[in-house]
Image: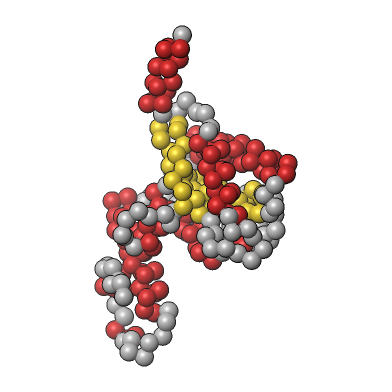
Amino acid sequence: MFICQYFERRYIMNSQKEVSVSFVRPIDPKDGYNPEHFEYIEKKLSKEIEDIENSSYSFVCNGLVSDSTGVSSITRTIIKKIFNADIVIVDISTLNPNVMFELGLRLSLPKMTIIIKDDETTLPFDIKDFYILSYPHSLSGIDLDKFVSDFKVRFVKTWTDFNTTDGENTFIHSFYGSNLISPEINTQNLNEAIDKLGNMIDLMQHKYIAYDPRDRWDSFDFEHDVSSPVPLD
């Protein structure tokens, strides 16, 4: 009996499709927040996600989109992970500018995104209509347990709807057919586009944000400059 159950479980695990999950959240300590606040939420949700039992899918949490083990540009690492992850969980507590920027990148894709925040963060007008789960700032009590329970339900339902509707429940899909964007994505040049976007951000960070009298603004060649990485100082 035990042997049969063992091989049955092994078969299910081998037949499951691996689904990658990444997180976007504030990293540096914030006033009024425990230094481990956001890491605690990430780890707690990661455990809950990986414990979800599903015969078709195996959810694997890969940490922050900014996590990198190589020597490549952190900007490219973040952008590629935002673009490549099957699911991204975004904690917009404190409305951190980097987090909001990365959320905007993710919402431009026909992929699954779940947004969370603590109950002391006031939503800006632009995203008040988004479905956002709130958790207690104190990270304790029955309210946190309820949040975790509601999160798991929302996670499974959103992933199920995403697959059964072919991504029609994503933010960007609501603009298809409106003459604002085309649903056609040239996947062949996606990596090139990601690299150019990374180069552009690096370029602005290293050269064009900080004013330098030696800069030749009239010689700025967008296509040339974003086609090659910015040399590190």
Considering every residue shown, the one lying at the far right of the view is 142
Residue farthest to the top, as pictured: 1
**x%, y% of residue 142?**
73, 41
Question: What is the number of callouts on the image?
Answer: 0
Where is residue 221 drawn, in percent x and y? 29, 77
Task: Judge whether 28 appears above or below 60 on screen.
Answer: below
Horizontal arrangement in the rendering, residue 60 relative to residue 31 (left or right) = left
Q: Quadrant of the C terminus?
A: bottom left
Q: Please state the horizontal and vertical placement of residue 193, each as a whole percent of the image.
A: 33, 59
Q: Is residue 96 visible?
A: yes
- Of 15 and 46, nearer the camera is 46
Point 57% across, 63% down: residue: 29
Q: Residue at x 37, y 75 (%)?
A: 206
Q: Is residue 202 above or below residue 68?
A: below
Counting from the top left corner in percent of width and height, residue 54 is at 50, 28
On the rendered structure, is 189 left or right of 108? left
Q: How are the residues colored?
A: secondary structure
- Residue drawn where x is 28% and y is 51% of the image: 188
Q: Residue furthest front?
A: 35
The vertical placement of 228 against 137, above or below, is below
Q: Is residue 130 visible?
A: no
Q: Residue furthest bottom?
A: 213
Q: Residue at x 54, y 59 (%)?
A: 26
Q: Is residue 43 left or right of residue 68?
A: right
Q: Nearer the viewer, residue 121 or 143?
A: 143
